[in-house]
Image: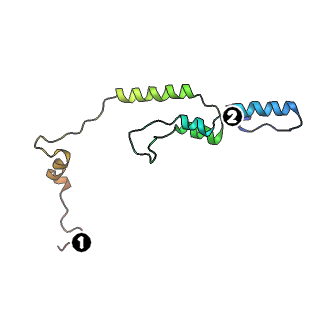
Amino acid sequence: MAVTDLFAPSFDPNDPASVAIWEAWKRRNLAMTRPLVEETRSPVSFNTGDPRGMVDPEALRVHAQGGPYDVAARRDAIAAALVAQQAAPQPQLQQQSEGGGLTQAMINDPRFAPVQGYGGGSS
């Protein structure tokens, strides 16, 4: 984005050339609307407070600050990032074979033992 695109051109409603330049700038920089932002909403695996999921943060930025936004290119980039994330090896939690899983492992681990003399009890 050029520096000149950051600011709206001067506008004279009585000058057709000025109106045309301003309309072109507006289409280029203020094309993102709230309904278009909502179209970028997608479900996520964590709680966002909205059961519909979350919108693309880049769409919100463009809606607030103006600028270009290519929906197809952004969706392709997000899809590529998700595929790369799913292809990456995931860390596995080690569980004890004696039942109880991770909680039982923590109970049996001396690093998680209560500290003597600390807290509200008598020493």
Say which residue appears at 78% left-offset and 34% top-offset: 22
Mark sitting earlier along the chain (1/2) = 2
Q: Nearer the viewer, residue 73 or 35?
A: 35
Q: Quadrant of residue 38?
A: top right
For the residue labelled by badge 1, is the local secondary structure a helix, a strand or a loop?
A: loop
For the residue labelled by badge 2, is the local secondary structure a helix, a strand or a loop?
A: helix
Residue type (three-letter) at the residue carrying disc 1: Gly
Q: Nearer the viewer, residue 92 or 66?
A: 66
User: Would residue 75 appear left or right of 31 to someone viewing this image?
Assistant: left
How many marks are shown on the rendered structure?
2
Question: Where residue 64 sits in the image (x, y, percent)?
Answer: 63, 42
Residue farthest to the bottom? 122
Say which residue appears at 36% left-offset and 29% top-offset: 86
User: Would residue 51 appear left or right of 60 to someone viewing this image?
Assistant: left
Q: Disc 1, disc 2: CB below 8 Å?
A: no
Which callout, 1 or 2, points to the residue nearer the camera? 2
Which residue in the protein does label 1 denote? 120
How dense is the environment of label 2, judged by Cα within 10 Å: few (below 14), some, or many (20 and up)? Answer: many
Say which residue appears at 14% left-offset and 42% top-offset: 96
- Mark number for residue 49? none
Residue farthest to the left? 98
User: Would residue 54 appear left or right of 14 to someone viewing this image?
Assistant: left
Residue type (three-letter) at the residue carrying disc 2: Asn
Q: Quadrant of residue 21?
A: top right
Q: Nearer the viewer, residue 82 or 38?
A: 38
Question: Where residue 116 sits in the image (x, y, percent)?
Answer: 18, 65
Question: Where residue 94 sits in the image (x, y, percent)?
Answer: 20, 39
Say which residue appears at 46% left-offset and 41% top-offset: 52
Alpha carbon separation for disc pair 1 and 2: 61 Å
Which residue in the protein does label 2 denote? 29
